[in-house]
Amino acid sequence: MAGAKVVHFTVVHRPFDTRIFQKECRTLVREGYRVALVAPHTRREVVDGVEIVPLPRFPNRLVRMGWGAWVAGWIVHRLRGDLYHFHDPELLPVGLLLKRSTSAPVIYDVHEDYPRLFAAKEWLPRSLRGGAARLVERLEKRACRRLDGFVAATETIARRFPPDKTRVVRNYPSLSVTQWVSEDRRRYEGNYTLIYTGGWTVYRGVYQIVQALGYVTVPQARLVLLGSMSSPRLAEAARELPGYERVEYLGKVPYREMYRYLNEAAVGLVCNQPVHGYQFALPNKLFEYMAAGLPVIASNFDLWREIVEGNECGVTVDPTSPRRIAEAIDDLLNRPDARRVMGRNARQAIRDKYNWEQESRKLVGLYEEVLSR
């Protein structure tokens, strides 16, 4: 229903988050909706037609999950939307309250398998992880009965929610990003730069990737790391590993600038560990590498193997074995012609199947459905 006011809100994600702002909010603006996004930010502004309504930055996660969620709820309620769409499990109580106190439909966007994720949160004391996971699970079950719609990032996540109210909207890149990289500029011969983008955590294979560099025999190989570290402890431990002298850590960079680094790389790495449901996730970085025309070295999960090897755009390996990762790196760095073919296959797969333009139709369809009930 073009012209309806929709309010997205999050206490976790930055205001220009790839899924929330770049994909969902901007798509809704193009479809004629009036869109507000409540998120941690420094000022109120309008960007690409989306009204950014700032939340304060909370001093720690526990404050954010408690007081922060209710501050967000108060702001969101005052915006008086025709539809509310939230993105964090800590906002489940707020979403349920909105459903009771307004006549507007409420949608829960489920980015991850949150009960599993809370069971693995490093910042939570071990004694609290099980209880936190069970609480999220109970709140999600209550939401299944009361909320109007669910947007799931993967098929596996979607199975936990009512089929008639749930749409799978995958985190595929927009076709526009393929214009940010140039096949003509990509260097295959003499290019030995590996790249990893995204957050550093134990379970995303950073240790294994850095250790693998210690076994790589191609002397020119180096790794560019982009993204934030989950803890100083992890960074210190990574620096102690033998392969770290080949690492160039650049921290977080703007989304568009990230593609400049992808365009200059030879191989993209995504080696998540087989724990906490990562086997069933669809990480942004995998498709961002493919959109940039990069051959990929990925974990040998069934779902990922189907994408990577099924489209002949890279190889999959045992992500728990630094030696196997190193062997795959050596093999691809020594075969520039194979990398060229894999990179072209990757971009074609994005154009044909794995793009946001196709996924966005399901989001818009869900909005039309819940607003017309």
Image (spheres, rainbow, N blue to C red):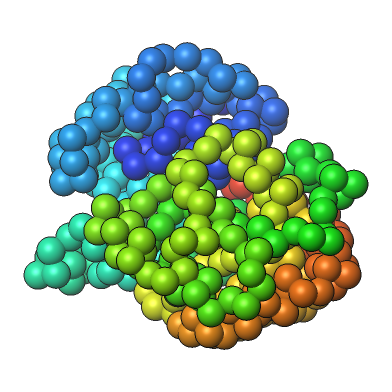
* Above-or-below relation of 367 to 268: above
Residue 276 location, quadrant: bottom left
User: Residue 206, position in %: x, y?
Assistant: 44, 66
User: Residue 199, position in %: x, y?
Assistant: 43, 53
Residue 368 location, quadrant: top right
Residue 167 appears in view: no
Name the quarter where the C terminus is drawn: top right
User: Residue 26, position in %: x, y?
Assistant: 62, 31
Q: Nearer the viewer, residue 188 or 41?
A: 188
In this picture, residue 124 sits left or right of residue 26: left
Residue drawn where x is 45% and y is 43% of the image: 251
User: Residue 41, position in %: x, y?
Assistant: 37, 25
Residue drawn where x is 38% and y is 31% of the image: 39
Residue 50 location, quadrant: top right
In this picture, residue 149 sits left or right of residue 62: right
In this picture, residue 252 sits left or right of residue 65: right
* Above-or-below relation of 313 to 230: below
Q: Nearer the viewer, residue 42 or 65?
A: 42
* Above-or-below relation of 175 to 203: above
Residue drawn where x is 70% and y is 62% of the image: 192
Name the quarter where the N terminus is drawn: top right
Residue 261 appears in view: yes
Q: Residue furthest front?
A: 219
- Counting the numbered discs, the total is 0
Residue drawn where x is 72% and y is 48% of the image: 264
Q: Nearer the viewer, residue 95 or 299?
A: 299
Q: Residue furthest left?
A: 127
